Image: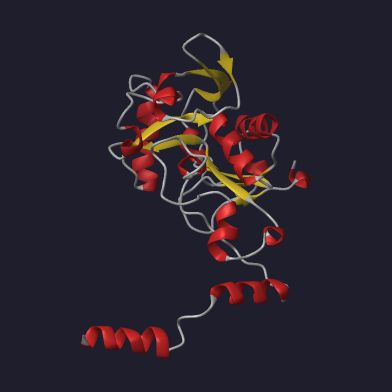
């Protein structure tokens, strides 16, 4: 009980509990800008994610309004953070043998990306399955969040690859090509085959790049292809796991 009493003093008497709806709306009215970060993927949203592997809450922009109590009109900018590859937690894949853009473990690209993921980002392929970037997942995020722009991370993990694949669609069991669609359940997701576009790699280290123009030509082309396919501007590119390191990009930098 003594611990609870001390906690009460810290939380209640210390003024650490506030009406956050009132607090946030007052700040918005005062012209302050508030940064809200989601903790999960749009594919895990309880309503619009891939059943049954969803979170128990909303993971899309609507959660800002329902969770924080601020009006929809106050959401000024929505930035989609995507990786240059696809990483899916193994627990998410427990009922299927693979996902559409999953890399073949016999593909030399898999070993290079897996090694870089471990050495540079401290993430193990024992926890995550690795795949090529899937623009169908990005399209789903755009629809459910109305993205203003895109931030691309992990670009450096593609540095050593001879060629790079982008999943732009799926082929279903009937052989029909499907684009920009996310299946509603995990079994369908596991049965669809990827439709790829393949581009040459750049075979150069991008981690020292300070501006977009410092990137190899093929890396710049990769980013522009993402913009073309998603119809969204890529405004930030990260080539390192270091905090506060990356390159803001505007149209004037092209």
Quarter the N terminus occupies: bottom left
Total numbered badges shown on the rendered structure: 0
**Residue most toward the top?**
175
Hey, which quadrant is residue 106 in on the image? top left
Q: Residue at x 33, y 26 (%)?
A: 96
Q: Is residue 9 visible?
A: yes
Question: In the shown orientation, is residue 60 left or right of residue 15?
Answer: right
Front position in the image: 39 or 121:
39
| On screen, residue 160 above or below 48 | above
| On screen, residue 21 above or below 213 | below
| On screen, residue 181 above or below 124 | above
Front position in the image: 49 or 221:
49
Q: Is residue 209 visible?
A: no
User: Coloured how?
Assistant: secondary structure
Q: Position of residue 186 (x, y in %)?
A: 40, 29
| On screen, residue 158 above or below 61 | above
Q: Position of residue 208 (x, y in %)?
A: 54, 47
Q: Residue at x 54, y 19 (%)?
A: 196
Question: In the shown orientation, is residue 199 left or right of residue 26?
Answer: left
Hey, which quadrant is residue 75 in on the image? bottom right
Q: Residue at x 34, y 86 (%)?
A: 8
Front position in the image: 99 or 2:
2
Quarter the C terminus occupies: top right
Q: Position of residue 131 (x, y in %)?
A: 43, 29
Q: Position of residue 46 (x, y in %)?
A: 46, 45
**Residue most toward the left?**
1
Q: Residue at x 65, y 44 (%)?
A: 212
């Amino acid at each position: 009980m003594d611990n609870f009493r001390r906690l009460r003093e810290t939380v209640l008497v210390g003024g650490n509990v506030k009406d956050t709806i009132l607090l946030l709306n007052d700040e918005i009215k005062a012209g302050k800008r508030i940064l809200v970060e989601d903790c999960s993927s749009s594919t895990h949203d309880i309503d619009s994610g891939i059943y049954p592997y969803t979170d128990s809450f909303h993971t899309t922009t609507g959660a800002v309004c329902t969770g924080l109590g601020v009006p929809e009109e106050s959401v000024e900018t929505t930035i989609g953070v995507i990786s240059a590859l696809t990483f899916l937690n193994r627990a998410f894949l427990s009922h299927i043998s693979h996902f559409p853009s999953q890399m073949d473990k016999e593909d030399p690209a898999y070993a290079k990306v897996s090694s870089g993921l471990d050495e540079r980002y401290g993430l193990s392929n024992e926890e995550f399955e690795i795949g090529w970037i899937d623009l169908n997942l990005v399209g789903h995020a755009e629809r459910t969040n109305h993205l203003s722009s895109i931030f691309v991370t992990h670009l450096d993990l593609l540095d050593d690859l001879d060629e790079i694949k982008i999943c732009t669609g799926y082929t279903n069991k009937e052989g029909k090509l499907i684009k920009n669609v996310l299946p509603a359940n995990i079994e369908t997701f596991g049965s669809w085959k990827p439709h790829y576009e393949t581009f040459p790699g750049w075979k150069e280290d991008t981690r020292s790049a300070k501006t977009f123009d410092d990137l190899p030509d093929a890396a710049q082309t990769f980013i522009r292809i993402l913009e073309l396919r998603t119809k969204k501007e890529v405004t930030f590119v990260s080539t390192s796991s270091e905090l506060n390191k990356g390159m803001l990009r505007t149209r004037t930098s092209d």
